[in-house]
Image (cartoon, rainbow, N blue to C red):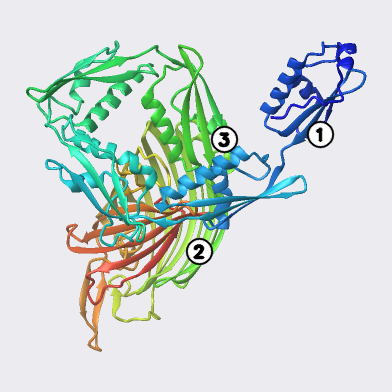
């Protein structure tokens, strides 16, 4: 800081000018003179006081705008403040690390952006953040040099990065570990030895994460705490690095101690309104069992939620331990400090530039005047996530006073409307062209509508749909659709024209019911130009046309936390439909679905999502079922690796040319099981990679007459055009007549 009182100020001038006669500010760009006067605290007529002038300089420097300030005086007792403002950062570049597409986001993460004032301390802090980020990726001896090039009234910054070398962990030793499997200890660490085929996504490549090394001892100690070893100690890791090869060995010194069992569990401080016996029945850590710190944490969270559901937003649960080293038992007491009951003063919504406040509020289960409830808070966040309007949802608690809080609902909107045009190629469909105009949230109203078409070698589809999930903000929904589908199967062509309407109601928080009606006209033409004569269908021996009139009812239970990429929750659904009141078809159709989603990031520090899905259907003939209405498996929404509609009961034989033939009949019962593991592929591009295995069964009289399975990988891409799923599948053990497919894709569906 520079504070200069020029030498031209003589003792006589100071004595003759006891009061400030004028104040001038020169060189200001970011501050007005009125603001400068307020900051300095000096006014014309004030006593000439060197200490006050010195304080005014300090006040100006605190603003962060200036690299230099000095004060001069005039002959008649005036003050002149001269400012040299900091340069503006006009250019930011990085060499040796990020791509151009990622640079802007990376600099923002570092705390810099174009237009900021150049501050050497801020630049040094950004440099340290960058080095720490690169070291977290496993690079050793990273060097970052910052070059500042002055421009006219600005400065250009270039970060030159030398990432150094990656350290690879060759061996990890747990000296003293006898009672716990060393594989269990290593699996808990952020730094692990390289797996076999460790270069594959999801496996460990052995690269050291230096920023996590200091925490790995605590992770290993936590493993012992999960197995009851309360006295276990784990030393800080000793890493020995070969400076030539950058191969490292890591050693931990461990003293395991003895294993403890739970002697007793007590709860103190429960508030009125909670049944103590009911809470105790739900606890995981029980008397006589081996102590487990993970169960302890779950019990603490459960007790806290029960208390918080009665309005105690700031309830705390503390575990008190009493160890008996003689018999290696531990007594646990959960001490509850409930604090004050809290009510909601206001719900403040931000970040919704398109979505109307009322659309958001109808999914928030807490309103002004309500008693705080933690379960309601969690359910509100999940409900907003399921809508598909937002990329991110946070609900924070803002304390107003001892008895009231505000809820701060912060959302980050995602693209819900799009004009799409695209195409692709599939082994079965050939070249495909599609276009759509759709919006899940028209004008922020929550109404979902779309018009689309897609064309390929074998299909022409048009559709128009509209759905309001909350008519007049009520619990009722209303939807309508019309469509025209022309699909050319291997053995026949199916044209369908139809429309439908459905009315739904939210029965409970996560339970939704609906009633629907649909009508369609259908025409079947024998495919005389089929490229293969080995496939036929029992219903394609002659042309037919029919109409179908269907009434349906269903229930859906959904607790997932996101519409497109759920990481937590369950989806259960069931429906029954009857075709027969009008139309030519007369049959019953029942269906059921299950979806289980579990993200493991909280457990393994990696964004792995496990999914299990089941879809089952059953038909019952009540008079007539046309062939196309029967069940077929295969394709992207069924058993991947097989062509669509290529798995069904059939009659196999031999034609006149001696070729094996297959005549499709269609099934009456089917079920498909799917397991998936999804991992991040590129966070910047919003892409994930999923490994899948599908197992399907279909039959006429029972589910398991035909069993087929497929496996493969899919790329889940949340593109600017909407979610796209690229599927690369292989059929498992297909027979010679099975029609297989290696690539398919979908758009607009949840993953």
Quarter placement of the N terminus: top right
- Measured as percent of width and height from the top left, residue 334 is found at 24, 18
Q: Badge 3 local density, few (<14 within 10 Å), some, or many (20+)?
A: some
Q: Residue at x 45, y 12 (%)?
A: 403
Quarter location, residue 437: bottom right
Q: CA distance from mark 3 to mark 2?
A: 35 Å
Q: Residue at x 39, y 30 (%)?
A: 378
Residue 11 lies, with reference to residue 104, above or below; the image says above
Is disc 2 in contact with disc 1, using a CB cutoff of under 8 Å? no
Is disc 3 in contact with disc 2, using a CB cutoff of under 8 Å? no
Which residue is under mark 3?
A: 351
- Measured as percent of width and height from the top left, residue 137 is found at 41, 51
Return the residue nearer the eye: 185 or 682. Answer: 185
- Measured as percent of width and height from the top left, residue 107 is found at 57, 46
What is the number of callouts on the image? 3
Q: Residue at x 12, y 32 (%)?
A: 259
Q: CA distance from mark 2 to mark 1?
A: 63 Å
Quarter location, residue 527: bottom left
Q: Badge 2 local density, few (<14 within 10 Å), some, or many (20+)?
A: some
Q: Residue furthest left?
A: 327
Is residue 437 visible to us here? no
Q: Residue at x 69, y 23 (%)?
A: 58
Is disc 3 in contact with disc 1, using a CB cutoff of under 8 Å? no
Which residue is under mark 1?
A: 27
Which residue is under mark 2?
A: 454
- Measured as percent of width and height from the top left, residue 150 is found at 72, 49
Instruction: Classify residue 353 as left or right of residue 691.
Output: right
Q: Nearer the viewer's eye, disc 3 or disc 1?
A: 1
Of the image marks 3 and 1, the number of the one nearer the N terminus: 1
Q: Residue furthest right?
A: 76
Return the residue nearer the eye: 389 or 46. Answer: 46
């Amino acid at each position: 800081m520079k504070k200069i009182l020029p030498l031209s100020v003589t003792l006589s001038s100071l004595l003759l000018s006891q009061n400030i006669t004028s104040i001038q500010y020169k060189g200001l760009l970011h501050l007005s003179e009125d603001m400068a006067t307020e900051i300095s605290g000096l006014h014309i007529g004030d006593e000439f006081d060197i200490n006050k002038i010195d304080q005014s300089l300090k006040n100006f420097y605190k603003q962060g705008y200036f690299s230099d300030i000095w004060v001069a005086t005039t002959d008649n007792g005036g003050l002149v403040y001269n400012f040299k403002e900091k340069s503006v950062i006009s250019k930011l570049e990085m060499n040796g690390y990020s791509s151009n597409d990622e640079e802007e986001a990376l600099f923002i993460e570092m705390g810099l952006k174009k237009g900021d004032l150049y501050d050497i301390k801020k630049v040094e802090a950004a440099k340290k953040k960058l080095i720490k980020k690169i070291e977290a990726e496993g690079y050793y001896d990273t060097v970052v040099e910052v070059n500042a090039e002055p421009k006219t009234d600005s400065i250009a910054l270039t970060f030159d990065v030398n990432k150094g070398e990656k350290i690879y962990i060759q061996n990890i030793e747990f000296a003293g570990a006898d009672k716990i499997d060393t594989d269990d200890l290593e699996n808990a660490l952020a730094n692990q030895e390289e797996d076999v085929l460790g270069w594959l996504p999801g496996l460990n490549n052995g690269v050291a994460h230096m920023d996590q090394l200091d925490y790995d001892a605590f992770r290993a100690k936590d493993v012992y705490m999960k197995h009851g070893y309360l006295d276990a100690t784990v030393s800080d890791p000793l890493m020995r690095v070969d400076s030539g090869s950058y191969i490292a060995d890591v050693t931990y010194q461990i003293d395991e101690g003895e294993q403890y069992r739970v002697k007793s569990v007590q709860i103190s401080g429960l508030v009125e309104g909670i049944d103590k016996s009911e809470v105790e029945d739900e606890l995981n850590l029980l008397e006589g069992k081996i102590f487990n710190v993970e169960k302890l944490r779950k019990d603490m969270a459960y007790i806290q939620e029960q208390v918080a559901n009665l309005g105690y937003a700031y309830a705390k649960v503390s575990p008190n331990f009493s160890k008996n080293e003689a018999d290696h038992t531990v007594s646990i007491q959960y001490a509850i400090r409930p604090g004050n009951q809290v009510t909601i003063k206001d719900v403040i919504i931000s970040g919704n530039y398109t979505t109307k406040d009322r659309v958001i509020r109808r999914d928030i289960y807490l309103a002004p005047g309500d008693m705080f409830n933690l379960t309601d808070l969690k359910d509100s966040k999940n409900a907003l996530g399921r809508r598909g309007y937002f990329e991110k949802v946070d609900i924070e608690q803002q304390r107003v006073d001892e008895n009231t809080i505000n809820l701060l609902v912060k959302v980050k909107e995602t693209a819900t409307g799009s004009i799409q045009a695209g195409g692709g190629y599939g082994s079965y469909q050939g070249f495909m062209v599609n276009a759509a105009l759709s919006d899940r949230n028209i004008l922020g109203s929550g109404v979902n509508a779309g018009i689309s078409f897609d064309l390929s070698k074998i299909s022409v589809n048009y559709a128009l749909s509209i759905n309001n999930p909350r008519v007049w903000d009520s619990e009722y929904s209303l939807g309508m659709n019309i469509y025209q589908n022309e699909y050319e199967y291997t053995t026949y062509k199916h044209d369908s024209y139809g429309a439908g309407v459905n009315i739904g109601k939210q029965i409970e928080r996560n339970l939704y019911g609906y009633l629907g009606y649909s009508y369609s006209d259908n025409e079947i033409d024998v495919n005389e130009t089929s490229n293969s004569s080995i496939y036929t269908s029992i219903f394609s021996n002659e042309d037919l046309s029919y109409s179908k009139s269907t009434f349906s009812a269903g229930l859906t239970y959904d607790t997932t936390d996101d519409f497109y990429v759920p990481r937590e929750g369950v989806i259960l659904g069931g429906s029954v439909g009857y075709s027969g009141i009008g139309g030519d078809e007369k049959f019953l159709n029942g269906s059921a679905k299950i979806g289980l989603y579990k993200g493991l990031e909280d457990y393994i520090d990696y964004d792995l999502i496990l999914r299990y899905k089941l879809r089952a259907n059953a038909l019952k003939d009540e008079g007539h079922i046309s062939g196309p209405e029967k069940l077929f498996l295969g394709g992207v929404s069924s058993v991947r690796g097989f062509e669509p509609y290529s798995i069904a009961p059939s009659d196999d034989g031999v034609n006149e040319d001696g070729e094996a033939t297959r005549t499709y009949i269609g099934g009456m019962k089917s079920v498909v099981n799917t397991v998936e593991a999804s991992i991040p592929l590129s966070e910047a591009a919003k892409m994930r990679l999923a490994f899948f295995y599908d197992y399907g069964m279909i039959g006429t009289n029972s589910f398991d007459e035909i069993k087929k399975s497929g496996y493969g990988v899919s790329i889940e891409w949340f593109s600017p055009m909407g979610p796209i799923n690229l599927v690369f599948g292989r059929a498992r053990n297909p027979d010679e007549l099975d029609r297989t497919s290696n690539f398919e894709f979908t758009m607009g569906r949840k993953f």
